Image (cartoon, grey):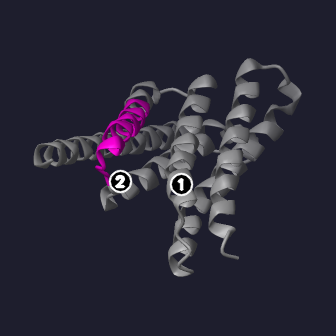
Amino acid sequence: MKHLPNILTIARLVLSLLMFAALAVISAQQAPALAPLLIRFAFAAFVIAAVTDFFDGWLARRWQVVSLTGAILDPIADKILVCGAILGLIAVHAPGILIAGGVILFREFAVSALREVLAPRGIKLPVTFLAKTKTTLQLLALGALMVIWFWPVWGVSLPIEQLHAAYITATLGFDVAALVTVWTGVEYGLAARRALKGG
């Protein structure tokens, strides 16, 4: 059982890649007859992967089996899930997420690069509560965007006005997630600057 948290993290990595692959096939229109099935699969993979994001860390702390492997893989799996969902939605031409999505992608890679630069100096940037919150906001907004953008697949009829309003609300939520993401990036940058000056 002590390996379950790491197994969940690896499962999140695999599901994230499969989700992106499904969205990429949809965008390429290589198998239009399979599109509804691929959409359902991509969304299910996203939801399951997002849920494992909570349980792997929670179980590792509860069972006191926090490992170096888990500490390395967990943030990587988070980034692949978020980045895969953003790129997948952009690939299927979901409107209103290109700019906010680009900002989130830039921040994620910038902070990862910052950690790589600081690591040889023995400087660590611990994950903050706000950073965990931004991941939750990102996942909720991306899940809502998937549900609404692929609405016809779910077999429920709603007036187009309601769908439009719901999509606007979801994109606003994604914008908020992007703003929080930027703020956490600024916090990490300031923390790195203080650590370097102190060193």
Tell whether position 124 is magenta: yes
Badge 1: few (under 14), some or many (20 or more) residues near its Cα, within 10 Å? many
Locate residue 115: give its quadrant: top left
Q: Amino acid at mark 1?
A: Asp
Q: Which residue is at the front of the view, 109 or 22?
A: 109
The residue depicted at 42 percent of the width and 27 percent of the height is 102
Q: Which residue is mark 2?
A: 131
Q: Which residue is at the front of the view, 86 or 153?
A: 86
The residue depicted at 53 percent of the width and 79 percent of the height is 64
Locate residue 133: give its quadrant: bottom left
In the rendered image, the quadrant that contains the N terminus is bottom right
Callout 1: SS: helix
Q: Which circle marks residue 74 in the picture?
A: 1
Tell whether position 113 is magenta: yes
Start and end of the magenta stretch?
104-125
Q: Which residue in the rendered view is the most extreme toward the right?
A: 33
Locate residue 104: give its quadrant: top left
The residue depicted at 39 percent of the width and 30 percent of the height is 106
- Residue 25 percent location from the top left of the image: 76, 26
Callout 2: SS: helix
Inter-mark Cα distance, 1 to 2: 13 Å
Q: Amino acid at mark 2?
A: Ala
Which SS type dominates the magenta stretch? helix
Is residue 43 something one can see in this rendering? no
